[in-house]
Amino acid sequence: MRVSYEQIANALAADILSRLREAEPAFFEGVIVDLLLKMGYGYGTAAGNVLGQSGDDGVDGVINLDPLGVDQVYVQAKRYQAGSPIGSAAIRDFYGALGLKDVTKGIFVTTSSFSPNARATAEKLGARIVLIDGPQLARLMVAHEVGCRVTEIFKVSVVEESYFE
């Protein structure tokens, strides 16, 4: 059953990732904000906003971590195909955008992957930048039921030994 479960979960994650790659950019940015709110970021369901549009200063969304919006996390969302990894230049650009917003926390999400240089760049910069690649994004969406839902739960029982003592 465990193997079957893993196969179903992997197929679901692959389907979600494929759909995200085909979605409109504004929809994708909204999905990322929705996911972060479902993961517990923000102070409530209205704590996240999609900013992605021309003049967004290089950020696609913001999550207010407190009711007044004093503590914020900014989001960059890039819809790329599987063979097009994010490079270090995009990470540096996002770091610069965080500096313009005077914040030190950001989440960079892609439907693709990050090059080794991009990962190294994110680690070296002074801001806390979390990188989420396509497979991780799909797993998080499944785990937090964003874009999918649970249809059945199977219970597996074992004998309670202490009951028979």
Image (tube, helix red, strand yellow):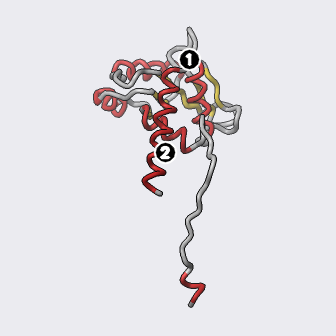
Task: Name the image quarter holding the C terminus.
Answer: bottom right
The foreground one among 164 and 134 is 164
* Badge 1 element: loop
Q: Which residue is mark 2?
A: 8
Q: Is residue 155 left or right of residue 97?
A: right
Residue assigned mark 1: 24
Q: Amino acid at mark 2?
A: Ile
Q: In the depicted view, which residue is nearer to us: 75 or 32?
A: 32
Task: Tell me residue 36's x, y (percent).
Answer: 58, 36
- Mark-to-mark CA distance, 1 and 2: 26 Å
What residue is drawn where x is 28% and y is 30%? 116
* Residue type for callout 1: Glu
Q: Residue at x 47, y 21 (%)?
A: 79
- Nearest to the observer: residue 65 or residue 60: 60
Q: Earlier in the sequence, mark 1 or mark 2?
A: 2
Say whether residue 113 is left or right of residue 30: left
- Residue at the extreme top: 54
Task: Quadrant for residue 133, please give it.
Answer: top left
